[in-house]
Each structure stands twice: as structure tokens, then as C-alpha cells.
Image (cartoon, helix red, strand yellow):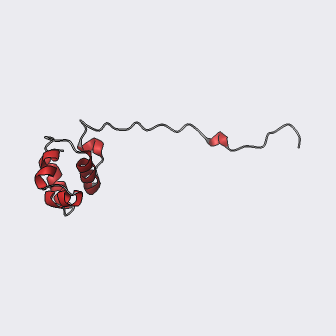
């Protein structure tokens, strides 16, 4: 997503750059803008924007966050002990 997409997504959730900056205790909206335009890096701002708009960091900032590989679960159905059939009735 580019800067305008991010700004629009925030607005749809009722946020302005000023509101995000105030929540994070930043100097002003330009601090958030510079992160969203990728002039500066701030994991804190990136994480908060991701939380607000509900989009994972990997999609918002793919150059900084790589998707985590999900481990595949092995078949665990045999973990439960089954009675052994030893030929007795």
C-alpha cells in the first residue's frame, strides 16, 4: 500500500495522522507521515497503523517485514493410545 492508501485506510477507521501521533506521543502528524512515506523507520508507528487498519505488517511494509513461515502440523492422530489387539478375545 502506498501513502495515500494507508491514509485513506486510517480515515475509514476514524483516524487521522494527528490522532495516531497523539496516541503514540509523537511530536506531530509529520512523524507518522514520514514513516508511511518510508522516509523514516519506526516499528512502533508501523505496528500501530497495522493494528488500526487490520492489515498485517508483512502486507503493509513488505520491504521490512517478511511473512512468517507457518509450520505444518504433522499427523497427530496416533498420539492417543489405542488398545493393542494381541489376539485375545
Q: Residue at x 31, y 36 (%)?
A: 66
Q: Position of residue 14 (x, y in %)?
A: 19, 64
Q: Is residue 89 left or right of residue 82?
A: right
Q: Position of residue 22 (x, y in %)?
A: 19, 60
Considering every residue shown, the one lying at the far right of the view is 88
Q: Position of residue 73 (x, y in %)?
A: 52, 39
Viewer-proximal residue, 55 or 36?
36
* Quadrant of the image containing the C terminus: top right
Q: Position of residue 80 (x, y in %)?
A: 68, 44
Task: Relative to 2, say whether 25 is above or below.
Answer: below
* Quadrant of the image containing the N terminus: top left
Viewer-proximal residue, 16 or 72?
16
Q: Residue at x 55, y 37 (%)?
A: 74
Task: Relative to 25, say whether 85 is above or below.
Answer: above
Q: Is residue 55 left or right of residue 12?
A: right
Kindly indicate the quadrant of the structure image that contains residue 35. Answer: top left
Kindly indicate the quadrant of the structure image that contains residue 20. Answer: bottom left
Q: How many marks?
A: 0
Q: Is residue 58 left or right of residue 82?
A: left
Considering every residue shown, the one lying at the far bottom of the view is 14
Q: Residue at x 78, y 43 (%)?
A: 83
Amino acid at each position: 500500500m502506498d501513502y495515500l492508501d494507508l491514509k485513506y485506510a486510517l480515515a475509514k477507521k476514524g483516524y487521522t495522522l494527528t490522532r495516531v501521533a497523539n496516541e503514540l506521543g509523537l511530536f506531530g502528524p509529520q512523524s507518522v507521515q514520514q514513516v508511511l512515506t518510508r522516509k523514516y523507520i519506526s516499528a512502533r508507528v508501523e505496528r500501530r497503523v497495522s493494528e488500526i487498519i487490520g492489515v498485517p505488517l508483512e502486507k503493509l511494509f513488505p520491504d521490512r517485514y517478511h511473512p512468517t513461515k507457518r509450520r505444518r502440523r504433522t499427523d497427530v492422530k496416533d498420539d492417543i493410545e489405542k488398545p493393542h489387539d494381541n489376539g485375545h478375545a
